[in-house]
Image (cartoon, rainbow, N blue to C red):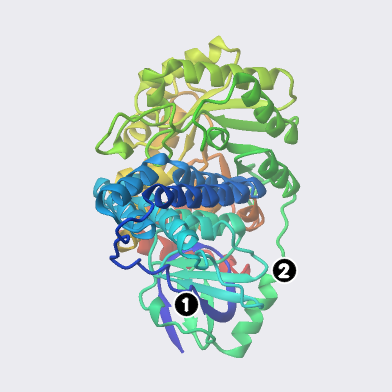
Amino acid sequence: MTTLNGVPVSPGRAAGVVVTMPAAVPEPPLARLPVGSDLDAAVASIDAAAQVVTADLFDRAGRATGTAADVLAVTAAMAADPTLAADAARRVRVDGETPARAVWDAAQTVIEQLEGLGGHMAERARDVRDVRDRIVAELTGQRPPGVPEPGHAFVLVAHDLAPADTATLDPETTLALVTESGGPTSHTAILARALGIPAVVAVAGAGELADGETVLVDGGRGTVERDPAPEAVAAAAERRHAHRSFEGEGHTADGVHVELLANVADTGSAAAAAAAGAEGIGLFRTEFLFLGRPEEPSVAEQTAAYRGVLDAFAGRKVVVRTLDAGADKPLPFLPADGERNPALGVRGLRTAVAHPDVLERQLEAISAAARGADAQVWVMAPMVSTPDEATRFAERCAAHGLTQPGVMVEVPAAALEARWLLERAMFASLGTNDLTQYAMAADRELGALAELSTAWQPAVLRLVAATCEGARAAGERPVGVCGEAAGDPALAPVLVGLGVTSLSMAPAALGDVAAVLAATSSARCRELAALALGARDAWAARKAVRAALPELEELGL
């Protein structure tokens, strides 16, 4: 038996036969159109192909829910962006390139620009490749990119997966996911957790896995065993079919309440979260309503969309995040003015400086939805960095009758100055994906930096602790985690031990996190937190905590 090691990103164990992703759409030949070709028709074929791809992606987004719908909408919006088609049309008319070659070259220019920017924008390069391949496939009559359908359950192995492919995985047939690339906070990892599919990324040697061989994937430990023992395969199958339910209230072994909430993006995902027993919503991403649209949705349209989510959690807490635009979520009506490094540019609450009317209309819509609903509405702003920003946001919330303003802690400065941010803000919510990326200066999509891009980093955990200390100093303000770290069953008791009072995650993770917390006393949570803080690196922190939590092994995590 050979064991391959990677970065654990979605807990659980599964065993099955390997199915590898098919080869990508091949690069079109360096061909020119014959002299006298109808250039207008060639350009029209590009526009038509882009429209087909855009319509298909938006259709998928409309049928998906939650994070999957959000990711598909982002990819669809990229396909609808006229920039790529316009450059391809120029290459056809000026250089005589074939439509397929023109699209390929135009996309390559965008890809190189995005990769040069790094951070979130480098992450978008994968989406451009996906859109490129889909348009080229449509132009050349090839099968578009997609996950294979072998007719049986399987472990999917790939160099990497486009978000649009990951979003369409079927948990009933995709037993586990193994990739050579990617990081723990990549879209691939986030979607795998949302779907409840065990996954390991950045696996050295994954490319050697062959179709038809049997592997055992441990998404909690980050291992892939080749040719596992039959009893191990049987045990993994038994655990997979043992659904762990959540009874609706999170608590430690000694009865300390820890709110277990859900991350949602729309009415459909809110209904799914309610069905899963979530105590409330810890992160309502409002971006989905804005993505792929040339104009801002009206106040009435926003109000109706927000009301649908609030009604799914009548009598319970719903934390609404205001528009998190910019960086990897550009919107046509909020131009970025050619930022060289959008990840460090005008994004989140910073967009309200140049476009205060957009925030005002959103707060008006949230307030209107709240007045007609029975939910406890809390509102938080993304990318808050200074006390003044927190104060101004709280004032704007108050002007609209919203009495529970909060801040997201995604920037190290906000964690270190949490006491002052929480003078006016009533709560904080840690976005561990961005907090990790900014603290470690590591692109979350770059496989080579995957070990850096994890909230297990002691430096990141110290920022979590600093936020909780600041919240206590400001009057025992509640602190939640709504980043992907909240859904890690091994990390959850560490976060509670650091002082976190609520955890918000994909609904699929609720049962596992609740089971671990119920087996761990609050005193033991503090001991685990001290172990993680005292470790020299993320690997040592994870190893020490797992060794001190044998319940993880017993629960199959």
Earlier residue among tags 1 and 2 = 1
404 sits to left or right of 338: right
Residue at (30%, 36%) from the top-left corner?
344
459 sits to left or right of 488: left
Q: In the rendered image of this protein, does residue 227 appear above or below residue 181?
A: below
Q: Which mark is residue 369?
A: none
Spatial distance from mark 1 to mark 2, Cα to Cα?
Answer: 21 Å
Residue 111 in percent (x, y) is at 31, 52
Near mark 2 (Cα within 10 A), the count class, few <14, some 14-19 or many ≥20, is few
Q: Is residue 485 visible?
A: no
Q: Is residue 213 visible?
A: yes
Residue 416 in percent (x, y) is at 33, 33
Which image quadrant for residue 174? bottom right
Residue 128 in percent (x, y) is at 39, 52
> What secondary structure is marked by label 2?
loop
User: If the image is split into quadrants, where does the C terminus sit?
Assistant: bottom right
107 sits to left or right of 316: left
Residue at (68%, 41%) from the top-left corner?
270
In this view, which residue lies farthest toward the front?
Answer: 36
Residue type at mark 2 is Ala
Residue 132 in percent (x, y) is at 41, 56
Q: Which mark is residue 224?
A: 1
Q: Which mark is residue 242?
A: 2
Residue type at mark 1 is Val
> What secondary structure is marked by label 1?
strand
Nearer the observer: mark 1 or 2; the answer is: 1
Near mark 1 (Cα within 10 A), the count class, few <14, some 14-19 or many ≥20, is many
